[in-house]
Amino acid sequence: MSGVRRDFPEPSGDTGDPRALFARYLGWYRATVVRKVRSLPQEEVRRTRLPSGWTPLEMLAHLAHMERRWLVWGFLGERLDEPFGDERDGRWHAPDEVSVDDVVAMLERVGRRTGEVLAGHRLDEVAPPGPRFPRGDPATLGWICFHVLQEYARHTGHLDVAVELAGGELGE
């Protein structure tokens, strides 16, 4: 297949430590979605090619907000001014003044914070009750990591389709 990249391999399988695996895979998915969005011509970053209407930049913003929402707001229980800052009118959103570089910088900050959370907490630790878990049924850090990882996996696949339709980079 023409245009397929293979120089960004899946993380190595040299550890069975779940925290290390979560950190490696989340880092890999972050790098993958950033690379895919950056492979697009500038005019395609804010253009939708799918019936659902989201753009590649909106997907990138959604992933940054989603990870922050689950790890910082959900697991740590810290207040966020806009935990759903990626959503408006029932769909994902990226303000006109926000660039790819801005969203990538947010994703990098969120990734560093996730790394700190993973380094400082056990996977069986339970999130405190709060706005993310209002019914008193908070999740463990391990469950949250699995949830965030599956969101990245699913949405990276969605982004693959949009990027291919827009003429961007194919593959991992």
Image (cartoon, rainbow, N blue to C red):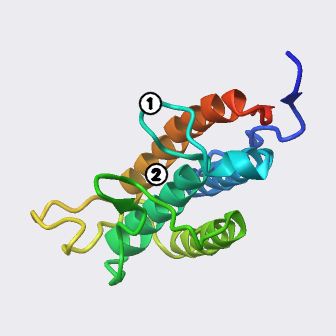
Where the C terminus falls, by quadrant? top right
Where the N terminus falls, by quadrant? top right
Can you tell which quarter of the image residue 83 is in?
bottom left
In percent of width and height, residue 123 lies at: 43, 60
Residue 21 vertical placement versus 172 (above, below): below
Residue 8 vertical placement versus 98 (above, below): above
Point 46% across, 54% down: residue: 145
The amino acid type found where label 1 is placed reads Pro
Can you tell which quarter of the image residue 44 is in?
top right
In percent of width and height, residue 36 lies at: 73, 44
Distance from label 2 to label 1 (Cα)? Answer: 25 Å
Point 57% across, 71% down: residue: 110
39 to the left or right of 17: right
The amino acid type found where label 2 is placed reads Val
Q: Residue furthest top?
A: 1
Q: Secondary structure at mark 1?
A: loop
Residue 83 vertical placement versus 147 (above, below): below
Point 61% across, 72% down: residue: 106
Q: Nearer the viewer, mark 2 or mark 1?
A: 1
Question: Local crowd at mark 2 within 10 Å, few (<14), some, or many (≥20)?
Answer: many
Give the numbered dot on residue 160: none
Residue 33 visible in the current orientation? no
Q: In terms of sequence position, does the residue under pointer 2 or pointer 1 come before the other?
A: 1
Give the numbered dot on residue 148: 2
In percent of width and height, residue 42 lies at: 76, 52
Point 40% across, 69% down: residue: 85
67 to the left or right of 168: left
Q: Give the residue at mark 1.
A: 51
Q: Secondary structure at mark 2?
A: helix
